[in-house]
Amino acid sequence: MTNNNNQLNVGFIGTGAICSLIAKEIESGKVGKVHIIAVFDINLSSANNLVDQLKSEPSVYNSIENLVDNPQIDLIIECASPIAVEKNAEIVLKANKDILIMSSGALLDKKFFSRLKNISNKNNKKIYVPSGAVGAIDTIKSLKGIINEVTITTTKNPISLLGSLGFKKWEEKKITEKKLIFTGNANEAIKLFPANVNIAATISLSGIGAENTKVLVYADPNSKSNIHEVSIKSKAGNYKFTFENLPSKENPKTSYLAILSALQTIRKINGNFLEIGS
Ligand SMILES: NC(=O)c1ccc[n+]([C@@H]2O[C@H](COP(=O)([O-])OP(=O)(O)OC[C@H]3O[C@@H](n4cnc5c(N)ncnc54)[C@H](O)[C@@H]3O)[C@@H](O)[C@H]2O)c1
């Protein structure tokens, strides 16, 4: 997906916590030959603030149309919100650019997903969804067709859950010990905790779908990390993975691993003679 100079030119939708860390790592050279061409954010001051800190002096655009109009850009990296994906992903693919999506919850809308699939196929463009704040995706993909059950148990400090619709009724109450605040499927979880359980969406998409993926969310005032336990039952065996993520300093809702996983996806897109993992 690189251009003739073997350089991957990227643009960003959303210039918050994830974008600023990805952008700084790109500029440090750790991701290979990647150049930041432009950024777009509905909050112009956030975009300007980030660009002021970057050496590559990307352009700041106030609309997605201007961003996709830039012929230099090969890949657009979404790190904004599920609404940003709904509004912009089709425009990006129609403009013949690949897209990397962090707000994977948006892809659970089946009609939207099928529209994106059609445009991607028609234009031969790709949608990349990093593993995010968990692993286990390679195992889940390898087990395609023979999975009986997937359960994701997420435990977060109440501070990391603040602002979510699903946590609203708990905000007034003092939580003094670990408490189960949600149980349901991934579809319901994403609606109630859109900023918190992107991993449920990513795992559903790689596995048995959102209706069949069970999600439990615990609020634990003693928890210093965002913990995701992924349990898989299949015809090939049963598997359990635990991820104890430290929140990123910039945004406690975002685990640092999610950012690292985006960087690894960019490295993968940018090409390597050896690809390990399924
Ligand atoms: N896949 C994963 O594992 C994973 C992990 C963590 C976060 N995320 C998701 O990544 C996204 C970004 O996270 P963050 O921590 O950087 O958030 P953030 O709040 O720090 O930054 C988001 C930025 O996007 C901008 N924005 C929001 N809606 C927009 C729109 N419609 N168009 C353009 N800009 C828009 C905001 O103004 C803000 O500057 C969130 O949706 C978050 O849920 C995914």
Image: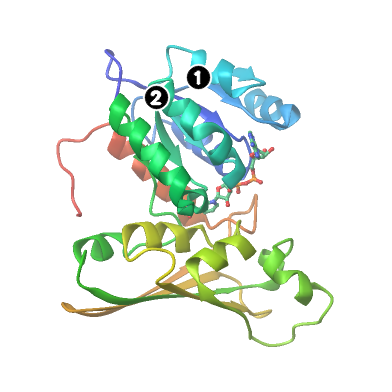
- Per the model, the C-alpha gap separating discs 2 and 1 is 8 Å
Ligand 1 under 8 Å from disc 1 Cβ:
no
Q: Circle 1 is placed at which residue position?
A: 68
Residue 211 found in image quarter: bottom left
- Three-letter code, disc 1: Val
Ligand 1 under 8 Å from disc 2 Cβ:
no
Q: Residue at x 49, y 51 (%)?
A: 109
- On residue 166, the disc is none
Q: Is residue 14 above or below residue 107?
A: above
Residue 203: percent from left, percent from top: 38, 62
- Three-letter code, disc 2: Lys
Residue 221: percent from left, percent from top: 69, 79
- Which structural element holds mark 2? loop
Q: Residue at x 54, y 32 (%)?
A: 88
**Residue 100 appears in the figure:** yes
- Which structural element holds mark 1? helix
Quick one: quadrant of the N terminus?
A: top left
Query: Which mark sits nearer the N-terminus, 2 or 1?
Result: 1
Q: Is residue 3 left or right of residue 53?
A: left
Residue 210 found in image quarter: bottom left
**Residue 81 appears in the figure:** no
Q: Circle 2 is placed at which residue position?
A: 97
Residue 179: percent from left, percent from top: 65, 85
The answer to whether the residues at label 2 and label 1 have Cβ atoms under 8 Å apart is: yes
Crowd around label 2: few <14 · some 14–19 · many ≥20 (10 Å): many
Residue 226: percent from left, percent from top: 55, 68
Q: Is residue 10 left or right of residue 195?
A: left
